[in-house]
Image: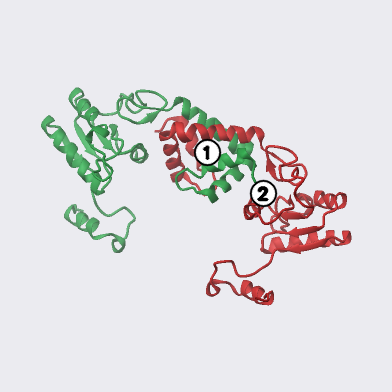
Chain colours: A red, B green
Amino acid sequence: MNSADIQSLIQLLAKLPGLGPRSGRRVALHLIKKKNTLLEPLSAALIKVAQNVRTCSVCGNLDSIDPCSICADTSRDTSICVVEEVDDLWALERTSVFRGKYHVLGGVLSALEGIGPEDLNIVSLLNRMRETSAQEVILALNATVDGLTTAHYIQEKIEPLEIKITRLAHGVPVGGELDYLDEGTLSAALRARRPM
Amino acid sequence: MNSADIQSLIQLLAKLPGLGPRSGRRVALHLIKKKNTLLEPLSAALIKVAQNVRTCSVCGNLDSIDPCSICADTSRDTSICVVEEVDDLWALERTSVFRGKYHVLGGVLSALEGIGPEDLNIVSLLNRMRETSAQEVILALNATVDGLTTAHYIQEKIEPLEIKITRLAHGVPVGGELDYLDEGTLSAALRARRPM
């Protein structure tokens, strides 16, 4: 018995990841109450993103410019960090440790979901490798079965180009307690132990 | 290192109830990926709500018309259900049991938060009581300390008008197990027991 406008807003909000009908109603009401400080800025921000944000034709990142600000940044070195999705790129950027460029695959190989090499940005990665003089490729894929399979596939494709290939270290998360770690992580951390 | 457009969208999404920086990023990325099916419809729905939805001048409900569709519905009876917020009204409407009209207080009395009777829509409620021939007032406030205080305050104000005043029943939630209920609810349910 809500107005149709509110109803359709709630239905759309309920489709967002992590939200459902109940939280959709809660968010809708909150937005209506904070019309000037939240609802209107949010609708303006959505329009801006819809108009401006595009996929970088070089690396697959999302940005308002193409090539994206990372690809256009000449102060960055020539190493390329391969990630599954844009949010992985964001996570790595927040560390401010990596000063090279990225390549977003757009997923991982998955026999189960029928995702093959042609569905990912692998050809464009190999072309980039051949055209630019990348000094290192970091395969920063998730440590899942599909992520590891994809990393091996890319490794095989890149090896003939004789570029240094690395992957992220496995080990104890900083702040983590040994007692709570799974055996796979703990044995990986033990095997890769480092001198103090 | 995201684009400024994405960054400001994430910051706004992170302010929504139940979301934070991490889920804000997740929602933003999801929206960008589903630009045509989610991002654009959502921004259109937000604009429509911002333009059309207003507070009903009679009862305090939110709707695209004023008086709201409930107040304007002549098939509804003259009883008035007093609720704290619009989401309580929505919850009661979903039951389809109540066929009267509503009055949204906009909160409850709270000494702690400094909310007095003048901050709530109590005067307009009393005016409605005097002007219309309401047969019954249902005080459907939350069963919290502040909710009960507010219900008692309104009861005292309405009593001189000699209108039937009721409140929602306390008891065992339908589908609930006795073992998990607090003692207050269980003793209320026992005292208010009904013949089978």
Q: Residue at x 28, y 35 (%)?
A: B105
Q: Residue at x 85, y 62 (%)?
A: A159
Q: Which of the pair B149/A74 is nearer the observer?
A: A74
- Disc 1 and disc 2: Cα gap in Å? 23 Å
Q: Is A187 situated above or below B154?
A: below
Q: Is B167 situated above or below A37?
A: below
Residue B133 vs residue B181: left or right? Answer: left
The label on residue A12 is 1
Image coords of residue B125 (percent x, y) = 23, 30
Q: Which of the two discs, 1 and 2, sits closer to the camera?
A: 2
Image coords of residue A27 (percent x, y) = 45, 41
Q: Is B36 situated above or below B14?
A: above
Q: Is A177 situated above or below A135?
A: below
Residue A82: quadrant of the picture: bottom right
Which element carries disc 2, helix, strand or loop?
helix
Q: Which of the pair A71/A180 is nearer the observer?
A: A71
Q: Which of the pair B20/B73 is nearer the observer?
A: B20
Residue A186 vs residue B131: left or right? Answer: right
Q: Indicate the amino acid at tag 2.
A: Val
Residue B18 vs residue A108: left or right? Answer: left
Residue B27 visible? The answer is yes
Which element carries disc 1, helix, strand or loop?
helix
Quadrant where the image shows the N terminus of chain A: top left
Residue A152 visible? The answer is no
Residue B126: quadrant of the picture: top left
Q: Are marks 1 and 2 in contact (CB under 8 Å)?
A: no
Q: Which residue is mark 2?
A: A86
Q: Indicate the amino acid at tag 1.
A: Leu
The label on residue B158 is none
Q: Give me the chain letter of mark 1.
A: A
Residue A69: quadrant of the picture: top right
The mark nearer the N terminus, 1 or 2, is 1
